[in-house]
Amino acid sequence: MYSKELTKGTLQPIILKLISSRDKMYGYEITQEVKKLTSGKIDISEGALYPILHKLEAQGVLVTEKIYVGKRVRKYYSVTKDGKQKVIEATKEINDFIITLQTIFNVKPTIS
């Protein structure tokens, strides 16, 4: 698992990108999907996830919808039109950052 210091700045774009790749997602689903996609290398705690989701909602990047599942209410998050633009911008920035890190650390990209 990567350190919190390493992943802290990338959690928001990771969460936003993941939600935008689906119609909508709820909190626990987001944490489990990130863990699955990264083979457990990135583990987002609820304490880290929900403040990010609330911030993105306040910025108008995400909207929520409450759906009853049995007797429980589940809060689903989906990306707004502005949020989709933010995903595009964040993806470009992350890709540029990766290239910069590869330059600094002399890492040659490998094709899997």
Image: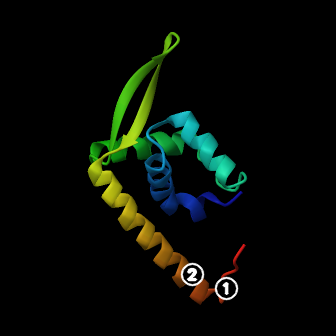
Q: Which mark is residue 25?
A: none
Mark 2 Cα shell of 10 Å, populated few (<14), some (14-19), many (≥20): few
Give whichever of discs 1 and 2 has the lower sequence position. 2
The residue under the point 66% across, 48% down is 35
Residue plotted at (40% across, 65% down): 90
Residue 101 is tagged as 2
Q: Amino acid at mark 2?
A: Leu
- Residue at 57% across, 60% down: 7
Residue 29, horizontal then vertical, whole percent: 57, 36
Q: Nearer the viewer, residue 68 or 105?
A: 68
Left or right: 96 as drawn, with respect to 111: left
Q: Which residue is mark 1?
A: 107
Percent x, y of residue 44 = 59, 47
Whole-Å distance between the Cαs marked 1 and 2? Answer: 8 Å
| Quadrant housing the C terminus | bottom right
Say whether marks 1 and 2 touch (CB < 8 Å). Answer: yes
Q: Secondary structure at mark 2?
A: helix
Q: Secondary structure at mark 1?
A: loop
The colour mode here is: rainbow
Q: Residues within 10 Å of mark 1 (few under 14, many from 20)?
A: few
Q: Nearer the viewer, residue 84 or 12?
A: 84
Q: In the rendering, at what x and y percent does residue 88 appear? A: 38, 64
Q: Give the x, y percent position of residue 80.
A: 31, 46
Q: Residue 101 lies in what quarter of the image?
A: bottom right
Q: Is residue 63 above or below residue 98?
A: above
Left or right placement of residue 80 versus residue 112 in this view: left
User: Where 68 sits versus 46, above or below?
Assistant: above
Can residue 44 be seen in the rendering of this structure? yes
